[in-house]
Image (tube, helix red, strand yellow):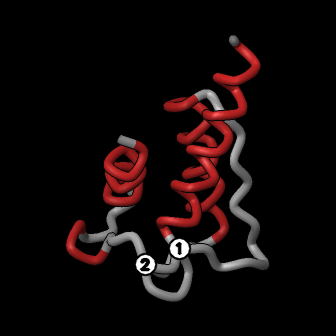
Amino acid sequence: MVYEKFKEMIVALGIPAEEVHENAYLRQDLALDSTETVQLSLELKKQFGVQVKIAAREDKTVKDICDLVKSELDKKNGEAT
């Protein structure tokens, strides 16, 4: 679920869907700039209610970001129980 939603967010920025896969790096492969990564961070917060910072200095893969979101969701759900 996280991967599909995140992929939709990236495609909404104008990146062709066929270029978005788990091992694609946000900057190197998808050519996202800092403004777009901030937009993604804000959208992740809106969609999932978790804060995930996508650092400008560190190029992460789509899977890396999805794993971070899942980890934050697990923490959040752990606090709720």
Q: Specify the quadrant of the image occupied by residue 75.
A: top right
Tag 1: amino acid: Thr
Q: Secondary structure at mark 1?
A: loop
Q: In the picture provided, is 65 more to the left or to the right than 5?
A: right
The residue shown at (56%, 61%) is 36
Q: Which residue is disc 1 drawn over? A: 61
- Where residue 27 appears, as percent x and y from the top left, is 56, 80
Say left or right for 56 vs 7. right
Q: Is residue 37 above or below residue 44?
A: below
Q: Residue at (42%, 44%) from the top-left corner?
A: 2
| Residue 58: image location, x then y, percent | 73, 78
Residue 15: give x, y in percent of width and height: 33, 69
Q: Residues within 10 Å of mark 1 (few under 14, many from 20)?
A: many
Amino acid at the residue labelled 2: Asn
Q: Residue at x 57, y 66 (%)?
A: 64
Q: Secondary structure at mark 2?
A: loop
**Residue reaching furthest left?**
18
Q: Name which of mark 1 and mark 2 comes first in the sequence.
A: 2
